[in-house]
Image: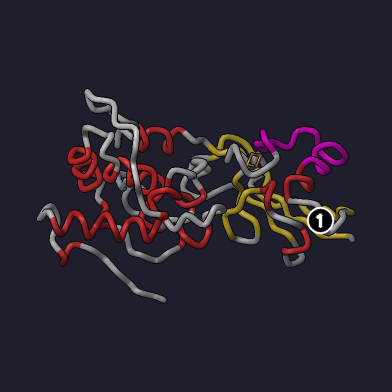
Amino acid sequence: MLVRVKLYRNHESLFKEFDVSLEPNQTVLDILYTLKENYDPTLSFRSMCRAGICGTCGVKVNAKPVLACKTKVRELEDPITIEPLDNLPIIKDLVVDHSALIERLKKLRIWYEPLGNNLQIFKTNSMVEKSFECIACGLCDASCPVFLTNQGFGGPMSFLRIYKLTQDPRNSKKEESLLRIKNAYIQLCTHCKNCSMVCPLGLMPESIIRFEEAELIKKGLISQSLTNSFDFF
Ligand code: FES
């Protein structure tokens, strides 16, 4: 099949158009490699595993943040518009700077601080289990409207990843983790659900944010009136 591709090139601040011959089962990442190999070797984009595991190939395709290696051409409307992710500075073409994502993870100290004794068993529910699976691709943060007005917001990726630390009895700093969530302005979340709609693993960060807010309200750390909800759905 022949598809028209509109590709963002940042040094020219414009979209370049190409007609590319592809198989329906090929992916957006295949488009990018085809363009780089056959049309323009200066094109820059990121990829590593090509299997939806490393989380590095995030781009915006037809206005939606996706993993390029997991998005099949046959699922997309023609023309296919490929742009860099929003909410992160562009380094070149489709390569964005992930430093802000990493800084947010560091600011919320998203790692275990173990107990003195060695607790081996942790029985948990499926939401907590699944939050362990986040690949830190940052698509959720790239879709979040709160960053347009507040760069201090913790963001759905960090709130998802810290959730396990607030639940796991093997973490000696459960209460501190909750306080960090509060200090990262969780109550600014608008519950638009963009993050849950774009998560390639279906981890539902917005639902996790609701759980965390409920826990903060229960502990008197935030008040009900501080939480936003547009309840679109
Ligand atoms: Fe690793 Fe796409 S290249 S997730």
Residue drawn at (59%, 37%), measured in percent from left and top?
Answer: 54
Work out which residue is located at the far front of the displayed protein and give it. Answer: 121
Residue drawn at (27%, 27%), measured in percent from left and top?
Answer: 114
Residue drawn at (67%, 35%), measured in percent from left and top?
Answer: 49
Q: Quadrant of the C terminus?
A: bottom left
Q: Is residue 229 magenta?
A: no
Q: Is residue 213 above or below residue 85?
A: below
Q: Is residue 214 left or right of residue 144?
A: left
Q: Position of residue 189 (x, y in %)?
A: 31, 59
- The quadrant holding residue 207 is bottom left
Q: Which residue is mark 1?
A: 25
Which of the pair 25/28 is nearer the observer?
A: 25
Q: Position of residue 136 (x, y in %)?
A: 49, 41
Query: Magenta region: which residues?
Result: 33-49
Crowding near pointer 1: few (<14 within 10 Å), some, many (20+)?
few
- The quadrant holding residue 184 is top left
Residue drawn at (27%, 34%), measured in percent from left and top?
Answer: 171
Which of the pair 35/214 is nearer the observer?
A: 214
Q: Is residue 37 magenta?
A: yes
Q: Is residue 54 left or right of residue 153?
A: right
Element carrying mark 1: loop
- Of the four image quadrants, the one with ligand 1 is top right
| Some atom of ligand 1 lies within 8 Å of the CB belonging to the residue at label 1 | no
Decide whether the magenta segment is chiefly helix, strand or loop. loop
Which of the pair 33/162 is nearer the observer?
A: 162
Q: Quadrant of the N terminus?
A: bottom right
Q: Position of residue 29 (x, y in %)?
A: 73, 45
